Structures are given as structure tokens and as C-alpha cells.
Amino acid sequence: MPQGTFECRWAFLGLSGIAEKFLLDLLLPRDTSKSIRHQLVAVSTTGPKERARRWLAEQASANAEDIVIYTSYEAMLKSGEFDIVYISTPHSVHFEHARAAIENKRHVLLEKPAVMNQKQYQRLSELAKKNDVVLMEGMWTRYFPLTKHLQQHIVPKLGAIKRVLADYSVPIFDDPAMDASARFLKKSTGAGSLLDLGVYPLTWIDIVLSSVSEATESATPVQVVFANTIEHDTPFEPIDDVTTVILSRPSPAFTGVVTISSSLPGSASLGLDDKLLRKKNAPSIRVQGTKAEVSIPFPPIRPETLTVQYYSPEALDEAGFETEEIVTKEVHGWGLWYQADVIAEAVRERLAREEATGSGTVIGEQGTVRVQGWMDEAKKRAGIQYSEELERLW
């Protein structure tokens, strides 16, 4: 291996569906020029060790027999030998699990949505800084090559951003293969379209607005001004489903429209991977500026291509028609490893220091806090309520 390669050791708290995809991405062959390698060394499960061992074998992990399996996450966080813990349990318990990790001086990659509300994430950020560790929300979409290209090279050419239309809708609720006790149907586990899906289109609005020169102290904050939901009946209780959120800012003038649903459009009979990779009738993201518009197709969680239509006078063709640009940035694997590299690099830098600084790092803190705040206000305006136990702060 190249000199200076960092072997980042991971622990998984939770063996979820997204954890399967994340592990497969961590195990992908790497370019030999890359200075970071990833390996899974420990997992925590609430089930039998034998089931966890089968789970590891199914993921084709080369070192499956060497991975330490804990039946107590507290024990893993206290005594495990690893660099970063990846938490992919239901977001209803993210605050509890992330707080325990941070207080054990662990670096944390926390699946999205990070927590149930903004105050919980602000508390975790405070604790991460106090305990000299790295904390990062696992909003993988922020770290894709296409996302970075959009921010650095496309958004500056759009002119003043006036409107963003952002949709993420996947027919999950009516999936015939879904068990009636599935997490996606239980409010006790934080279920609902707004938190499960809405975090993505709201993040796209944040990605765009934080990329422009208007993102200065003189700009007024973007606020949620309307939210409404059509509920979906479950065996337990109704949960938010077909949801619309409108955001606005008076100066510079901006409007954002977010739409989400866990029941439409599309076939509910397809497997989840097919649902996520299926072509849709309309683009998921549309960013409209005074000079050009960008459209990003479904799925917005894993962007590989975008189309720009330029319509400022200097960009028109000889006949006065708009001109077009298509940008493609292919993704290796699912693309979850991009975020893994980001936090691993930050952890490597901290480990290289001779002494602790007494001040941890929260990667993407402002963006996560903004999006959590928008979800809080949308919940309030749409009448989406969770128990005090899930929302509590300590």
C-alpha cells in the first residue's frame, strides 16, 4: 500500500438495510492512489450473535470471522478498538446512541435524519466539540461528485436563485412485501414521510442556497411558511404521507417547494432497489435562476447527471432558443463511500495530532442544523406530532 495510507476501522451500531449498502461500499476495490482504506472491525446487535455472523457473511466481508460482535452497544462504545462508529438505528434513538458514543470519546457518522429535532442535534454538536471528537450527519448526497460540481461550477452561472422545486416520493407504504410491524409504519420509531424522505429535498434546497454568493449575513433566513400533509392509515395510527412544504425568504427573494410521499407515484410491488433506481416522469430537483435552470432526475438521493438550460440573452442560440448542457458524474457503487472518506480524513487529521485540542469538529454542522429546523417548523405547521419521549432533550 502507498506510504501514508490510513486504515480506517469502523464499528456499526445497527445492522440496517442502509448499513448493508454502506458496508458493500466500504469494501469496494479502491484506486491504489487513494490514501484511505476502510474496514469493518466491530458490530453491535440486539439479536443473537449467530444472526449477526450470517449478516456479515452475506455481505461478503473478507474478514467476517475476525469482526467482533457485541450484543451491547454500550460495551462496544466503551471498549471496542475502532476509529469511527456508524449509527444506522432508527432515528428515534439516534440522540441516545450518538450521545453515548460521543461521551465515550468516539467519532460518529450518524445516519440521516440525524435526530428528531434541531435542539437534539445542537446538543450533540456541543458535546462533540467538548469531547474533542468528529461528528457528521450521514447525508451522503452532499458529497457526490455531481453535487460538488453543481455547487462549484453550475450554481454560479444560474444568476439569482429564485425558486427550487424538490420532490422525493417513493411508494413504500403499500409494498406487499412489507411486514405490518415494519419501522416505516410506526410513529414510535420516528416514521413518516417528512423525516424519512423530506430530509433529502430540504437538503437540496440547503445545498443550492449555501452555494451562492447571496449566502451572506445580509440575506434573511429562509423559513418554512406553509406545510400540509395527507395522512396514511397504518395498523397502529395514521402517519404523515403526501406532504407539501413551502419555504420563503424576502431578501434576496426566494421560494422553495418541497413535495414528498411514501405511497405515490409508482409501483409499490417493486423491490426497494428497483424503486430507487426507477426512471420517473418528471425531474426530482429543479433549480431556477434568472439566467438558467438545472434539473436533476430521480433519484435525488444518488445524483449522477444534471441538465442545465441557459436562457439569458447572451446564452441563446442564433434563433433565440435556449442552449443546453448535460453533465454526468458516474458513481462507483452506491456512493456511500464518499461520505466515509470525508469523515475518515477528518479523523486521520485529529489522530495525527500529538495532543487533544479540546475542541471537536462537526462536519456540515450549519447545514444539518438548518434542515432540522425546517423539519421542526414543517412538523408544527402540518400538525405532525411525535411523543415527548422521542423529542426530549437531556
Image: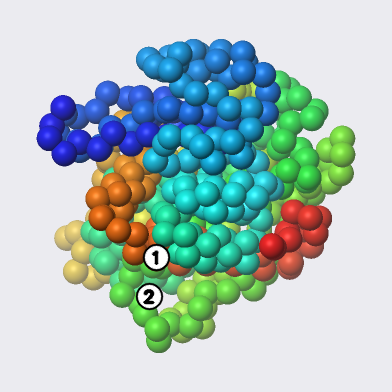
Q: Amino acid at mark 2?
A: Ala
The Cα atoms of the two marked residues, 2 and 1, are separated by: 30 Å
**Residue 305 visible in the displayed image:** no
Q: Which residue: 75% across, 50% down?
A: 240
**Residue 66 visible in the displayed image:** yes
Dot 2 alpha-carbon crowd within 10 angstroms: few under 14, some 14 to 19, many 20 or more: some
Relative to the observer, which residue lies in front, 240 or 166?
240
Dot 1 alpha-carbon crowd within 10 angstroms: few under 14, some 14 to 19, many 20 or more: few
Pointer 1 residue = 358
Say if 232 sits above or below 207 in the image: above
Pointer 2 residue = 215
Q: Quadrant of residue 237?
A: top right
Relative to the observer, which residue lies in front, 262 or 91?
91
Q: Amino acid at mark 1?
A: Gly
Q: Quadrant of the C terminus?
A: bottom right
In the picture provided, is 111 more to the left or to the right than 182? left
